[in-house]
């Protein structure tokens, strides 16, 4: 037996085509502003991917590539300008930020109605209180992926490994909102395998290559691998690998690949959020 492959591409394409159709009904294209500091190669490449896809689906996307040494005051001034700009519906500040910038202060500065990452405390609070506003892209993308493949969540045991503000915590909130019974595991969880074996839906976002091995997985479980780790293969070539060991495919019922699983969903969810923000700002509230 080998697990069903939950490829991101078809689910992301479906989400993008729904978002593009909604965007076409608006009086003007939804506007996305992407802010990035410095030139960390991974950030440059993610931002390029987001900007390219945004244009493909008919959004007006602008990348603000600022030098690494940009001061916090300069960054906050740009955010204030984008908050005030009529034709900007979504603002994304690419993380991580350089160490001299107070990340929490920057995320708080983004107008919550333009916070297409769903990182502002207002959106976080709304998510946990069960009145979701704009949803964090990776967890929202995971929910769309599960739905696309008809994997049920309601009434099932879900385990999330990792409790970061951008992935693990909001993932747990969305699974809870979808009526799963949710456990959130982390570095201080004793006997992680005993916990993950309980999961009918297992989401792994730890940033540890191959942390989850076959004996940690319940037979037939749906396993979502959020991890993106750059590792050297036997030939010394740099490759992307997930947090889930490939042999898990022999135990799981369904498994997301890395790359080509959650990554494309994250980008699609960001663009769908931007359309949602535009609809709300223009007073034309469409579906979600
Ligand atoms: N596909 C996509 O679109 C995206 C992928 N990612 C990837 O997902 C992964 C996680 O990202 P992110 O959440 O930002 O990472 P963080 O490093 O912020 O958080 C990692 C979490 O995993 C937990 N953890 C780490 N090691 C273990 C372990 N051995 N056992 C149990 N828990 C552990 C940590 O626990 P503790 O809190 O106790 O330290 C922490 O809560 C990374 O590989 C990242 O590249 C991230 C964003 C988007
Ligand atoms: N403000 C902010 N918002 C984010 O959403 C955000 C961020 N900062 N910082 C970094 C993480 C990471 N992230 C990814 C997006 C797409 C892929 C993606 O498309 N991955 C491809 C592979 C890409 C490659 O080849 O490098 C895949 O998995 O198939 C991965 C990771 C968004 N993040």
Image (cartoon, rainbow, N blue to C red):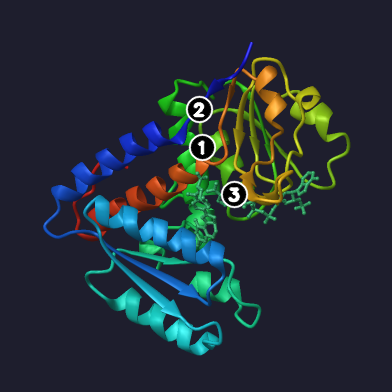
Residue of label 1: 261
Residue of label 3: 167
* Circle 2 SS class: loop
Point out residue 89 in the picture as x, y percentages from the top left corner: 29, 64
Residue at 72% x, 19% y is 218
Residue 11 seen from this side = yes
172 relative position to 21: left or right? right
Sequence-wise, the earlier of marks 3 and 2 is: 2
Tell me the distance, in whole angstroms, between the alpha carbons under discs 1 and 2: 7 Å
Residue at 20% x, 50% y is 23
Badge 1 density bin: few <14, some 14–19, many ≥20, Cα 10 Å: many
Sequence-wise, the earlier of marks 1 and 3 is: 3
Q: Nearer the viewer, mark 1 or mark 3?
A: 1
Residue at 41% x, 64% y is 112
Residue 232 higher or lower than 16, as above or below: below
Q: Nearer the viewer, mark 3 or mark 2?
A: 2
Marks 1 and 2 close (CB-CB < 8 Å): yes
| Number of numbered discs visible in the structure rendering | 3
Residue 166: quadrant of the picture: bottom right
**Ligand 1 within 8 A of label 3's CB?**
yes
The label on residue 6 is: 2
Point out residue 66 in the picture as x, y percentages from the top left corner: 45, 81
184 relative position to 123: left or right? right
The label on residue 20 is: none
* Circle 3 SS class: loop
**Ligand 2 within 8 A of label 2's CB?**
no
Sequence-wise, the earlier of marks 1 and 2 is: 2
Residue at 26% x, 39% y is 17
**Ligand 2 within 8 A of label 1's CB?**
yes
Point out residue 64 in the picture as x, y percentages from the top left corner: 38, 76
Residue 95 higher or lower than 257, as above or below: below
């Amino acid at each position: 037996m080998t697990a069903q492959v939950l490829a991101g591409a078809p689910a992301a394409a479906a989400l993008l085509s729904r978002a593009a159709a909604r965007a076409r009904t608006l009086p003007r294209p939804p506007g996305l502003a992407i802010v990035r500091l410095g030139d960390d190669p991974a950030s440059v490449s993610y931002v390029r991917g987001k900007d390219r896809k945004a244009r493909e689906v008919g959004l007006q996307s602008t990348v603000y590539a600022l030098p690494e040494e940009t001061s916090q005051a300069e960054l906050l001034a740009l955010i204030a300008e984008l908050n005030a700009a009529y034709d900007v519906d979504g603002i994304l500040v690419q993380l991580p930020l350089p160490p001299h910038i107070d990340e929490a202060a920057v995320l708080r500065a983004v107008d919550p109605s333009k916070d297409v990452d769903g990182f502002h405390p207002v959106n976080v609070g709304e998510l946990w209180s069960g009145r979701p506003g704009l949803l964090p892209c990776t967890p929202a993308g995971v929910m769309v992926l599960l739905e696309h493949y008809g994997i049920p969540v309601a009434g099932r045991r879900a385990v999330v490994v990792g409790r970061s503000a951008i992935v693990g915590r909001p993932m747990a909130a969305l699974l809870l909102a979808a009526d799963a019974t949710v456990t959130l595991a982390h570095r201080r969880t004793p006997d992680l395998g005993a916990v993950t074996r309980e999961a009918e839906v297992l989401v792994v976002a730890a940033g540890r290559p191959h942390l989850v091995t076959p004996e940690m997985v319940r037979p037939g479980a749906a396993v979502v691998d959020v991890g993106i780790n750059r590792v050297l293969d036997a030939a010394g070539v740099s490759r992307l690998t997930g947090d889930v060991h490939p042999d898990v495919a022999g135990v799981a019922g369904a498994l997301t690949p890395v790359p080509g699983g959650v990554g494309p969903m994250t980008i699609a969810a960001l663009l769908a959020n931007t359309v949602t923000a535009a609809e709300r700002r223009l007073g034309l509230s469409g579906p979600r």
